[in-house]
Image (tube, rainbow, N blue to C red):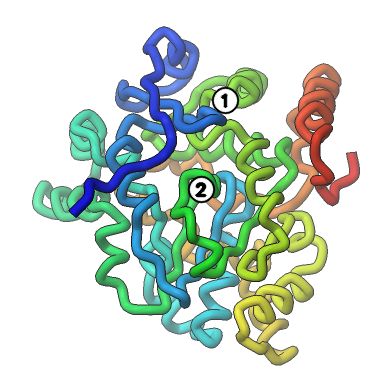
Amino acid sequence: MAEKKVPFKITDVPKELTAEFRKYTDGPEIEFVRVGLEKYRFPAGFREECVKVYNMELRPDDIFVVTFPKSGTTWTQELVWLIGNNFNYDSAAEKLLKERFPFLEYAMMTRNPKIEEWTRARMQVSPGIAEGILKKLTTSVVDVLNTTPSPRFIKTHLPFSLLPPHLLDTSKVVYVARDPRDVAVSYFHHCKLFKLVNFHGEFRIFWKMFLKDEFDWCPYFPHVKEAWAKRHHPNMLFLFYEELNKDLPAAVRRVAKFMNKPATEEQVQRLCRHLHIDNFRKNKSVNAEDLQDLGLANKTEHFIRKGKSGGWRDYFDEEMTRQAERWIEDNLRDTDLRFPTKD
């Protein structure tokens, strides 16, 4: 049997290039890599996991939700899962979303001796339970998916260039994009929430580092433009977070049609109530309270936050706003991609 490989180049990030990142984070000191032509940034654990991901066996009834982090991923996952499972709210409440809709590349962030030691020391449970949790956290999601019955629901933040090459020819993909300024604000709070990063700088510092692609899955624009180029494929549904936010019932109908799962108006309205931010924030299946209870996330932050568009205005001063406008203009110059937002 031929050895499985990947067609993209992976290079180590010299430690001196992560000095600023380490200055403002309290997680374990690990190594990072840059991947592919766009030099996407990941923990070094990606070297091993990417081979499994790129060569994973796909099924025609697989449903992928693909996003750059903090683009409305969790919201979309719950929407897609409930439509795909005939609006079974009881099952959705009984099982955590991350188990119903596993995170494809998760093991790249956890399968590392330094991270395992760090995690073991911080879990607020007995040693026996901690080892069981660690085993689950470090198991390759691809291996789990290989024994998961169909239909499989799969979340990933990977760009298309790092996913299986025949993904769209085999499976359905819902891609969600969001105004990068709102993404940056949400990512900032995400990095403050999870102790594995525990970012402790102010937003201005985070924004500067975000523009320099110093966080996982960056750079932002190549990720979105890769998906935008594939938006006309029949197995692809490209959505904007702002569209979901402005008219959720219409988005639900679009997703249901895309998944060949007709929905009645009553089902649409109930799902919209379920996904309303006030209810979603209280939903223990999706709000990461389990990680806070384990001691792996800070209780001063919330995984499900405001659920709105345009919140970046509360964080950007005039200089940052002008900088963001230039950044967006420069990156959209060669494409017809435009975000449905008001500047």
Coordinates of residue 95 in the picture (x, y in percent): 37, 72
Coordinates of residue 262 in the picture (x, y in percent): 66, 89
Q: Amino acid at mark 2?
A: His
Residue 66 appearing in the image: yes
Above/below status of 152 relative to 314: below
Asked whether 206 or 335 is in front, the reply is 335
The residue tagged 1 is: 213
User: What residue is rendered at 74% in x and 63% in y?
Assistant: 244
Quarter of the picture holding the N terminus = bottom left
Coordinates of residue 189 in the picture (x, y in percent): 57, 37
Are the residues flagged by discs 2 and 1 in contact, CB closer than 8 Å? no
The disc at residue 50 is none
Residue 295 appearing in the image: no
Counting every numbered tag in the picture gives 2
The residue tagged 2 is: 157
Q: Classify residue 124 by image quadrant.
A: top left
Distance (Cα) linking label 2 and label 1: 15 Å
Q: Classify residue 91 by image quadrant.
A: bottom left
Q: Classify residue 69 by image quadrant.
A: top right
User: Dot 1: few (<14), some (14–19), or many (≥20) neighbours within 10 Å?
Assistant: some
User: What residue is rendered at 49% in x and 69% in y?
Assistant: 170
Above/below status of 247 relative to 336: below
- Residue at the extreme left of the image, as rendered: 128
User: What residue is rendered at 51% in x and 48% in y?
Assistant: 157
Q: Amino acid at mark 1?
A: Asp
250 sits left or right of 34 in the view: right
Quarter of the picture holding the C terminus = top right
Mark 2 and mark 1 lie on one chain; the one further toward the N terminus is 2
Coordinates of residue 158 in the picture (x, y in percent): 50, 46
Q: Secondary structure at mark 1?
A: loop
315 sits left or right of 174 in the view: right
- Residue at the extreme right of the image, as rendered: 342
